[in-house]
Image (cartoon, rainbow, N blue to C red):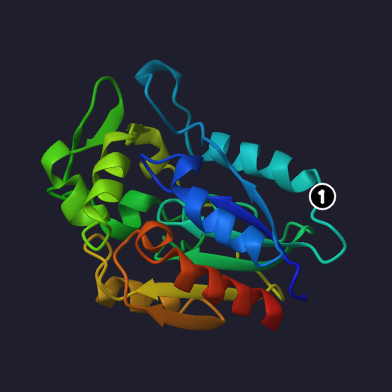
Amino acid sequence: MGSDATFVLVHGAWHGGWCWDTLGRRLRELGHTVRVIQQLPSAGPNPAELGDLRADADLLRAELDAGGGDDGVVLVGHSYGGMVISELAGHPAVRHAVYLTAAFPHEGESLFGLFGTDADWVAPGPGETLRVVEDRAVEVFYHDCEPAIAKEAAARLVYQSLASAATPSTCSGWGPIPTTYVIATEDQILTLEVQRELSRRASNIIEIASSHSPFLSMPDTLADVLTGIASST
């Protein structure tokens, strides 16, 4: 993989493809191709229309089936997005999988199974959904971002389906495809202890001094990290 890698970026719970906008620009400026999953079916403003992990995986599979160029793609999953990219383990278009402070499940593990159900910043939403407690969003997701950026991001959060957190993974491992876990040492959602435990499942580990949202708080640093990962493949 050279300096002109193709990245496919998968957002986490409650978010959308908008969260990658700044990072995407940085990566393109570095000469890369960037493809973004704009909205996973499990997240959105209408509780009645939300899907589960399987629906998310189907959407990502369609994106990967469209091809990844001669060198394949570097697949990046943030947070819950790690559950989604794990469903595509072994897909021939993927040349490297990156878990950005993310869930990294073994077969049969759900998001609830990995992290539990008692986070005090999560509350029931309408129908079978989960929502982020409004006055906790900046604190847990964006505490090291510029205040205006954090406020705007918090206002764009949507509902997440309960089913997406309860569905078990079918991931049986990436085989020969290399994986990198990027630990965010200042993360207020996934503790450093949890991330380091999950990172043992990856073939490579990188640490950055960031909150849960380095694509917003330090996009230049993250772009350089991803470029280095792509170049090492």
Q: Looking at the picture, how far across and down is residue 168, in whole percent?
A: 46, 48
Residue 171 appearing in the image: no
Q: Quadrant of residue 8?
A: bottom right
Q: Looking at the picture, how far across and down is residue 76, in whole percent?
A: 56, 60
Q: Quadrant of residue 75?
A: bottom right
Question: Which residue corresponds to mark 1?
Answer: 67
Q: Looking at the picture, how far across and down is residue 167, in whole percent?
A: 44, 42
State the quadrant of the N terminus: bottom right
Kind of residue at badge 1: Gly
Along the horizontal axis of the image, is 88 left or right of 162?
right
Residue 228 appearing in the image: yes
Q: Looking at the picture, how far across and down is residue 233, in whole percent?
A: 71, 79
217, 162: nearer the viewer: 217
103, 26: nearer the viewer: 26
Along the horizontal axis of the image, is 29 left or right of 213?
right
78, 127: nearer the viewer: 78
| Mark 1 Cα shell of 10 Å, populated few (<14), some (14-19), many (≥20) | few
Using the image, determine if residue 178 lies above or below residue 49: below
Q: Residue at x 20, y 50 (%)?
A: 138
109, 145: nearer the viewer: 145
Q: Residue at x 74, y 74 (%)?
A: 3
Using the image, determine if residue 177 lies above or below residue 146: below
Along the horizontal axis of the image, is 107 left or right of 97?
left
Most extreme residue toward the right is 70
Using the image, determine if residue 98 lies above or below residue 40: below
Along the horizontal axis of the image, is 74 left or right of 191?
right
Using the image, determine if residue 153 lies above or below residue 75: above
